[in-house]
Image (cartoon, rainbow, N blue to C red):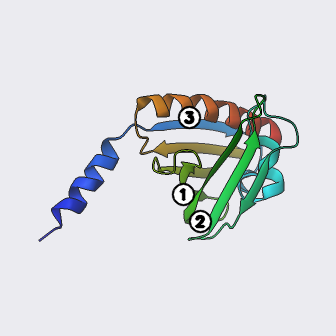
Amino acid sequence: MADRSAVTADADLAARPSLTLTRRLRAHPEKVYAAWTDPENLVQWFRPGRAISGTARAELDVRVGGRYRISFTGPDGEYHEVGGVYREVVPNERLVFSWAWHSTPERESLVTVSIRPEAGGTLLTFHHAQFADEGARDNHKRGWTEFLTNLESFVA
């Protein structure tokens, strides 16, 4: 007999808000994957344009069960840090990792980055799921839209 609490928890997570963004990038999948998995690359694009220059930092242990931490300082001097654990790592194809801001660690969500070769470039499908509420999803959509635009420029 199935554990009803596990089934209910899975249904609750699936019902929470999510977002999916896609980008067609003019770069091979290997370059796109390296942009996500090399700390020196990541800090070049993973930050809002208004972050204080030189404050972005990334520590990445890209393996299943490995942890990551990314931080930057906003224009108001506020420190921002996000981190989590890699759940799936398929080089040049897919990354799945948990996501939680240091200020709200109880609001963990899940990010899936799918990288697929397409017409001499890459189709990137970005899926962020299990948000606490629609406001969190909408705020992240604004941030991810900016970050993915930065990524597009970085890998071009």
114 displayed left or right of 122 = left
Q: CA distance from mark 1 to mark 2?
A: 7 Å
Are the two marked residues, 1 and 2, in contact with CB atoms closer than 8 angstroms? yes
Q: Residues within 10 Å of mark 2 (few under 14, many from 20)?
A: some
Q: Which mark is residue 96?
A: 1
| Residue 104, horizontal then vertical, whole percent | 52, 45
Furthest toward the right, the residue is 54
Q: Residues within 10 Å of mark 1 (few under 14, many from 20)?
A: some
Quadrant location, the N terminus:
bottom left
Task: Inspect the image, locate mark 1, and give the three-letter code of the amino acid beneath it.
Answer: Val
Are the two marked residues, 2 and 3, in contact with CB atoms closer than 8 angstroms? no
Q: Is residue 58 above or below residue 86?
A: above
The residue mark sitting in front, 3 or 1, is 3
Residue under label 3: 140
74 displayed left or right of 88 = right
Q: CA distance from mark 2 to mark 3?
A: 23 Å
**Residue lying at 62% horizontally and 35% vertically, measured from the top left:** 144
Q: Dot 1: what SS?
A: strand
Task: Inspect the image, locate mark 2, and give the three-letter code of the amino acid beneath it.
Answer: Val
Asked if residue 156 can be seen in this view, the reply is no
**Residue lying at 72% horizontally and 48% vertically, measured from the top left:** 71
Q: Please tell me how many numbered marks the rendered image carries.
A: 3
Quadrant location, the C terminus:
top right
Q: Dot 2: what SS?
A: strand
**Residue lying at 63% horizontally and 43% vertically, measured from the top left:** 123
Q: Residues within 10 Å of mark 3 (few under 14, many from 20)?
A: some
Residue under label 2: 89
